[in-house]
Image (spheres, grey):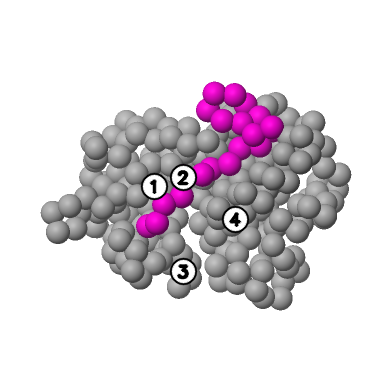
Amino acid sequence: MAVNKETVTWVKHWSSKTFSFKTTRNYPNKFNNGEFAMIGMEHEGKKLMRAYSIASANHEDYLEFLSIKIDDGPLTSKLQHIKVGDEVLINPRSTGTLVIDYLEPGRNLYMIATGTGLAPFLGIIKDPATYERFDKVILTHTVQYEDELAYHEPLKYFNEEWKELTNGNFIYFNTLTQQEWPRKGRITKWIKDGSLYSATTGQDLDVENDRFMICGSQGLNKDLIDHFESLNMSEGNTSIPGKFVVEKAFVQR
């Protein structure tokens, strides 16, 4: 596996469970917003590599990643201690199914994220093509506790900071499952009972025109695949566009 060495330029610990970091982008890699790449570190003469969604947009001059912390994880047990100036390994080849080209044309785009599944959508919401293709761009993020809401402040004010890009058409919607919050409960509940749609766009689900991108746990993925297929909505992939797409490249980090 061909890899490049990049230098860490920024680290942010969101909570005891998650952190983000940025690196230099010294190679002319091309990727679609929403894809993932293999990143890692050298340890005892070996390369430890795992799949991580790219959280930066493809037009930015740095690479950004969002990671969980697992004390006994082969990679994250070491990666969570990185600091500015350290080197990480990145495979310049990227792939994945969370690409807007793999969706049929539609009206509203719903991006459903739990935990670090937020990462691929952070690049998609900075992509001008996203707002050219969809009237409303809705990003949902579900975690257990408030301190796990990575990027909460930037997302809360995203329309203000990126107003020329979004024209006010970006909607950020978060829910908590284990703490009192204005929007409490699993995102699957909000989707299945229709309250997500009324709370964000004020409209009912339109299976012909609403599109979904999903990145979360295997349980969430299966639950929503079953739900959308029960509504006769087709799953898209790299070959055939559909009404929803799901990232399934989950590995132990």
Residue 51 marker: 1
- First-in-chain label (2 vs 4): 4
Q: Give the labeled residue for mark 2.
A: 249
Query: Which sits in the foreground, 182 or 186?
Result: 186
Q: Secondary structure at mark 1?
A: strand
- Amino acid of disc 1: Ala
For label 2, the crowd category at 10 Å Cα-Cα, with few meaning under 14, some 14 to 19 and many 20 or more, is: some
In the image, is residue 76 above or below residue 89? below
Identify the residue at image location x=50%, y=50%: 119
Separation (CA) of disc 2 from disc 1: 7 Å
Q: Secondary structure at mark 2?
A: loop
Identify the residue at image location x=43%, y=42%: 36
Separation (CA) of disc 3 from disc 2: 20 Å
Classify residue 135 by image quadrant: top right
Q: Give the labeled residue for mark 3.
A: 17
Classify residue 75 by image quadrant: bottom left
Where residue 16 appears, as percent x and y from the top left, is 45, 73
